[in-house]
Image (tube, rainbow, N blue to C red):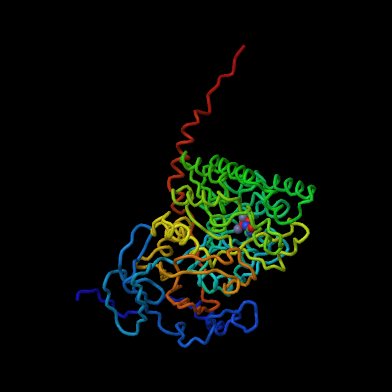
Amino acid sequence: MGGNFIGTQTVIHFSLFVVLLLSFFPPITESSNQFCEAGTSYGYPDCGISSSSQWSSPSKILIKGGTVVNAHHQEIADVYVEDGIIVAVKPNLKVGSNVTVLDATGKFVMPGGIDPHAHLAMEFMGSRSIDDFFSGQSAALAGGTTMHIDFVIPTNGSLSAGFEAYVEKAKKSCMDYGFHMAITKWDESVSREMEIMVKEKGINSFKFFLAYKGSFMVNDELLLEGLKKCKSLGALAMVHAENGDAVFEGQKRMIELGITGPEGHALSRPPALEGEATARAIRLAGFVNTPLYVVHVMSIDAMEEIAKARKSGQRVTGEAVVSGLVLDDSRLWDPDFTTAAKFVMSPPIRSLGHGKALQGGLSTGVLQLIGTDHCTFNSTQKALGIDDFRKIPNGVNGIEERMHLVWDTMVESGQIPVTDYVRLTSTECARIFNIYPRKGAILVGSDADIIILNPNSSFEISASTHRSRTDTNVYEGRRGKGRVEVTIAGGRIVWENGRLEVAPGSGKYIEMPPFGYIFDGIDKADAKYLSSLRAPVKRFKATS
Ligand code: URP
Ligand code: ZN
Ligand code: ZN
């Protein structure tokens, strides 16, 4: 039998930093972590004593006989991992001893999901989102996501202070993560600090909120300054596109009409306000000639603006989120406040029809990637708005469910091929935030962030079994086909046979360099624009 022999040479990969952290934070299995405490609402039926500690074993793994899927190609092959890195992808690999072998026959071997949009431990609307960098990432790993990008919120307008606060929050990470940063005010120091964030701190994207009047919202003047600065730094400008002034007006209108419940949330901020802000942001980004990334596209109205811009050649990226794809707004009218309030997020989950259209946008290339906007608040936190929907902390879960729901909704239904699934859930995120092919690929030299998905297995979602700390789940009771049976993060098996084994402090911060592919050629377009101006015109003063 012919084959390729992989030697046992060790690639030294783990940094001293991680080793030190691990000595402070020992690994946790479900048998010993906080979620397994008997009698808590977060306990699982599958908790038990872990017999083998993968964590302390050498990380040599051979995944045999699966269909290895990248965004550009799929083939039946083996994947060999040593010390956190993929070192071979070929059929019939032969390896040395002391290797953990996983049989993936009949299953798909794919890059771990990358969630471009999550808010762990976020201070928002008088609360802090309940999943922190450990519980949120544990949930992610159990669902096949191996990296997420969070949004640093400046502290009193200071980007550096905000960054430091998030470095602190992220110390308990058990999977790799990166940061975007929000820009909530404008002055010389913000402009300077943006430069520091990009050149020294590994941030290559900034989010501008066009909604949340009175807190995060920025006006057009600030947005323009931000777009110009982003362009000069090679950083991607992101927008939360809703017209915040009009939303404020819509909220007043609902309260005056006596509509104070969660349904008022959707009624106060209709799709037209998302469409307007999306169109405005696109036009301003076009005016500056810098790429734009529209986060959580929730409506046909916003998607059509993106489609129009892309058709005209403008560089606009549209991010769908799983809640927008598979849910509709009907539950906001549920007579039970807790049930209705758990669906409150912004932009709102739309009426039936929008989700299906967004799915179509993904399969035809109008939208490019899928995130979650995971930002969970429990029932007690949501109850802050029991008498006034404006006070319900905005956000839903999804970091654990995204990979399964997208598979079931888009692949199992035949809407997209498996290669597109990989592109939409992982590769495009890595490409746009400039960390490909280290992330988002099963290639020699890529990080060993890998999932094995069994298309013949099934899943069921429930708050009683999920890993998130929240006590509700917007996908409660959903079942579907396709189950992530194994998650490998950083070369370690962290999820197998329904058991999670994770270590706080083991996740690495992934720096994201500026001037990703989306900036290629921007300078040429600038030059073309300048040469098209036919100005200044030489004029002669009239002599009389
Ligand atoms: O409702 C949401 N989306 N909460 C998180 C904050 C944001 O706007 O992304
Ligand atoms: Zn947002
Ligand atoms: Zn968000």
Image quadrant in which you'd find residue 453? bottom left
In-image side of 154 versus 434 (left or right): right
In-image side of 463 versus 214 (left or right): left
Residue at the (36%, 74%) spot, across then down: 81
Q: Position of residue 303 (x, y in %)?
A: 53, 46
In-image side of 29 versus 447 (left or right): right
Q: Position of residue 241 (x, y in %)?
A: 61, 48
Q: Is residue 323 visible?
A: yes
Q: Quadrant of the N terminus?
A: bottom left
Q: Position of residue 470 (x, y in %)?
A: 64, 70
Q: Residue 387 or 1: which is nearer the viewer?
A: 387
Q: Position of residue 37 (x, y in %)?
A: 62, 83
Q: Residue 412 or 500: which is nearer the viewer?
A: 412
Residue at the extreme left: 1
Image quadrant in which you'd find residue 281? top right
Total count of labels: 0
Q: Quadrant location of ligand 1?
A: bottom right
Q: Is residue 171 visible?
A: no
Residue at the extreme front: 335
Image quadrant in which you'd find residue 100? bottom left
Looking at the image, residue 232 lies above or below residue 103: above
Q: Residue 94 or 109: which is nearer the viewer?
A: 109
Q: Quadrant of the C terminus?
A: top right
